[in-house]
Image (cartoon, helix red, strand yellow):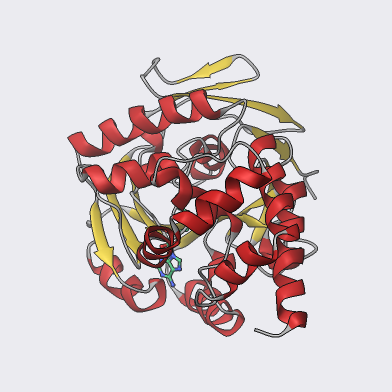
Amino acid sequence: MTDDELSRLADGYRAFVREAREESPAYSALAAAVAEDGAVLRFVADLPAGKRQPNLLFASLRFLGVVPADAAALHESVMTDADRLRDTMLARSTQTNEPARCAALLPALAMIDGPLALIEVGTSAGLCLYPDRYSYEYDGRPVGVRKDVHLRCTTSGPVPVPRELPRVAARIGIDLNPLDVTDPGDLAWLRALVWPGPVEAERLQRLDGATAVVAEDPPTLLTGDLLERLPDALELVPAGATPVVLHTAVLPYLPETHRAAFVEQVRELPVRWIAQEGSGMVPGTGERYPGGWGPYFVLSLDGRPLAHTAPHGGRIDWLPVA
Ligand SMILES: C[S@@+](CC[C@H](N)C(=O)[O-])C[C@H]1O[C@@H](n2cnc3c(N)ncnc32)[C@H](O)[C@@H]1O
């Protein structure tokens, strides 16, 4: 890797310093340390493109049992455990599965006549396929009978908070590598992907609750690329159900041409389409941010932007109704 490429890699870590600042001061500080540590940067640079993200590096360290306390501890951990760390980063991917995103999806789901056949592309372990099995609170206003997984959400603007939970007739997930909530290794990886910080305990509790829900009544999981498997998923939609293709935090992982082909395919299918993605990832949903991740996500229905949301759920700012 040239000096220029190393410097771009360091810049990527510097961008993560800002991204993680609030939710994980520890990861924010570690990202700053990586950006200044030539040996660690070269270790990361030797991995294939797509395997160099801060999230993957830090989750892999955590999976191996370490959250380095400072720059020196980070350097030591990477240098002394380089082989296992490299193997973990090569074997695993960033597959953070955050059920709290369902609180942002719920108002959009409620705008569609049910029963719904949910087809989630980039589903990870499928935790966002169960919006009807969680309970909610929007600015203190409850929706659904209280469940183990209870999702709180603050709002602004005219959010159409539903009175009822959606009726879900089918749950179908597509992923390059679907995670299995009954597999201890996959469960440990899902937990390792949660950032250390002020909301960590809450997120882990939610994750454990949601994986228990999924384990009790597993979804249909299709392995493969979202474009290729979408037709197979549509064939599984039961008669009388409305097919809803949905995705959250997936489009930045697709190369530009692949993303455009996916958007074109979904637009042509006889489905409703809900996206919760970085601004501009779906055409017409705002300004694009470098790498696809900005300070907020945009919730859209059939390509029409409805709201800005916190990337991990938890906040919805409804856009003025045109
Ligand atoms: C950050 S995770 C998001 C998981 C889930 N949607 C959520 O919001 O909690 C992104 C997921 O997209 C999957 N993914 C990335 N590219 C994909 C592709 N081309 N086809 C199918 N899945 C893909 C990854 O394997 C990963 O599980």
Q: Nearer the viewer, residue 131 or 81?
A: 81
Q: Is residue 241 left or right of residue 106?
A: left
Q: Nearer the viewer, residue 283 or 287?
A: 287
Residue 110: x and y in percent read: 50, 39
Residue 98: x and y in percent read: 47, 41
Q: Residue at x 67, y 64 (%)?
A: 292
Q: Answer yes or no: is residue 308 visible.
A: no
Q: Quadrant of residue 310?
A: top right
Residue 32: x and y in percent read: 74, 51
Q: Does 153 appear above or below 48?
A: above
Q: Nearer the viewer, residue 59 or 100?
A: 59
Q: Answer yes or no: is residue 264 visible.
A: yes
Q: How many marks?
A: 0
Q: Quadrant of residue 259?
A: bottom right
Q: Does 138 appear above or below 15?
A: above
Quarter holding the N terminus? bottom right
Q: Residue at x 52, y 39 (%)?
A: 67
Q: Nearer the viewer, residue 49 or 235?
A: 49
Residue 277: x and y in percent read: 61, 56
Q: Does 268 appear above or below 287?
A: below
- Split into quadrants, the picture shows ligand 1 in the one at bottom left
Q: Is residue 123 left or right of residue 75?
A: left
Q: Quadrant of residue 68?
A: top right
Q: Does 250 appear above or below 125?
A: below
Q: Residue at x 41, y 76 (%)?
A: 227
